[in-house]
């Protein structure tokens, strides 16, 4: 989305938010109040509303637990591009380090745990990495029943959360997800010494079903590889 008169290119997010989580723009407000680095600014946000008939179409009940999916929109001041578009491993690792800084400061300063670390929610913008999509974030001390459900992108969930559904999501799970993001992206996009067959095998381990995912994540440790952090280009 482009607003050439004021902000230039912006990110417009149209989604259905889960009412059991705090609205994303309110999470951003807390992050900024705590001076967390490497996060976007919210330009506008809110639930989509209308008259009585229209409003009934903008929300739907989830089972019988009292929660709803609510039509929601958010505008951020950075558009960004995927980290898989990094021009080199150097650029990629710097973006990851910026996202890690945002995560660390969110935990320490704002007492907020991100809960969903994936390739898709770390973006590049003007040479920096930004951690976005905070809609599933929670208070770091929250141990309410909803925290017993697995939260995050399946491909990058920690082995601990994959192995048992009722684990409460903790900082260590997000940090392990960062490791899986680096591993997946390096295997898929960075130039490396893996032959095509081994490369395909490793990538498949990130897409296994629930019954085999934990074992398959563990099996990736059998294959050692190094990510050379330099100006070497990513593979298209």
Image (cartoon, grey):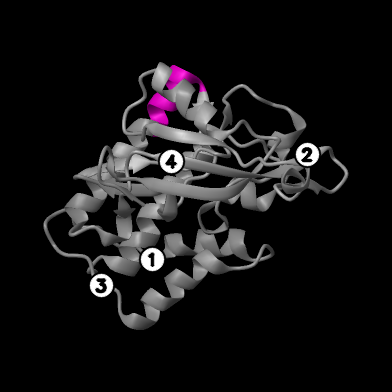
Q: Is residue 47 left or right of residue 197?
A: right
Q: Which residue is mark 1?
A: 223
Compute the Cα span from label 4 to label 2. Answer: 24 Å
Identify the image quadrant of residue 50. Answer: top right
Contact, mark 3 vs mark 2 (Cβ under 8 Å): no
Residue neighbourhood size for the residue with mark 1, other residues' Cα within 10 Å, grouped as few (<14), some (14–19), many (≥20)? few
**In front: mark 4 or mark 2?**
4
Residue 178 image offset from top left, x and y in percent: 41, 46
Label 3 Cα crowd, 10 Å radius (few <14 / some 14-19 / many 20+): few
- The mark closer to the camera, 3 or 2, is 2
How far apart are labels 1 and 4 at the CA level?
A: 42 Å
Question: Mark 3 = which residue?
Answer: 236
Label ID, residue 67: 2
Secondary structure type for disc 1? loop
Q: Mark 4 = which residue?
A: 75
The residue segment tinted magenta is 103-111
Of labels 1 and 4, the one closer to you: 4
Looking at marks 3 and 4 on the same chain, the residue that comes earlier in the sequence is marked by: 4
Is residue 163 within the magenta segment?
no
User: Picture coordinates of residue 121 (x, y %)?
Assistant: 43, 48
Classify mark 3: helix, strand or loop: loop
**Badge 4 or badge 2: first in the primary sequence:** 2
Instruction: Tell me, yes or no, if residue 158 can be seen here.
Output: no
Q: Nearer the viewer, mark 3 or mark 4?
A: 4
Q: CA separation, marks 1 and 3?
A: 23 Å
The kind of secondary structure the magenta stretch mainly shows is helix
């Amino acid at each position: 989305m482009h607003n050439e008169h004021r902000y230039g290119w912006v990110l417009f997010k149209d989604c259905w938010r889960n009412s059991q989580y705090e609205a994303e723009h309110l999470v951003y407000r807390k992050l900024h109040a705590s001076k967390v680095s490497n996060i976007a600014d919210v330009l506008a946000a809110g639930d989509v509303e209308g008259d009585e008939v229209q409003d009934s179409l903008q929300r739907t009940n989830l089972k019988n637990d009292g929660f709803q999916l609510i039509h929601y929109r958010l505008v951020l001041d950075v558009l960004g591009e995927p980290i898989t578009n990094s021009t080199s491993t150097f650029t990629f690792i710097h973006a990851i380090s910026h996202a890690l800084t945002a995560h660390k400061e969110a935990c320490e300063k704002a007492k907020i745990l991100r809960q969903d670390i994936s390739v898709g929610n770390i973006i590049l913008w003007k040479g920096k990495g930004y951690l976005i999509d905070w809609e599933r974030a929670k208070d770091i001390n929250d141990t309410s029943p909803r925290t017993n459900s697995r939260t995050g992108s399946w491909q990058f969930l920690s082995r601990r959360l994959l192995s048992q559904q009722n684990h409460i999501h903790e900082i260590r799970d997000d940090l392990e997800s960062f490791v899986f993001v680096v591993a997946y992206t390096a295997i898929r996009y960075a130039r490396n010494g893996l032959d095509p067959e081994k490369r395909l095998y490793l990538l498949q381990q990130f897409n296994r079903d629930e019954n085999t995912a934990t074992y398959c994540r563990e099996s990736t440790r059998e294959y050692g590889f190094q990510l050379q952090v330099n100006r070497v280009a990513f593979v298209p």
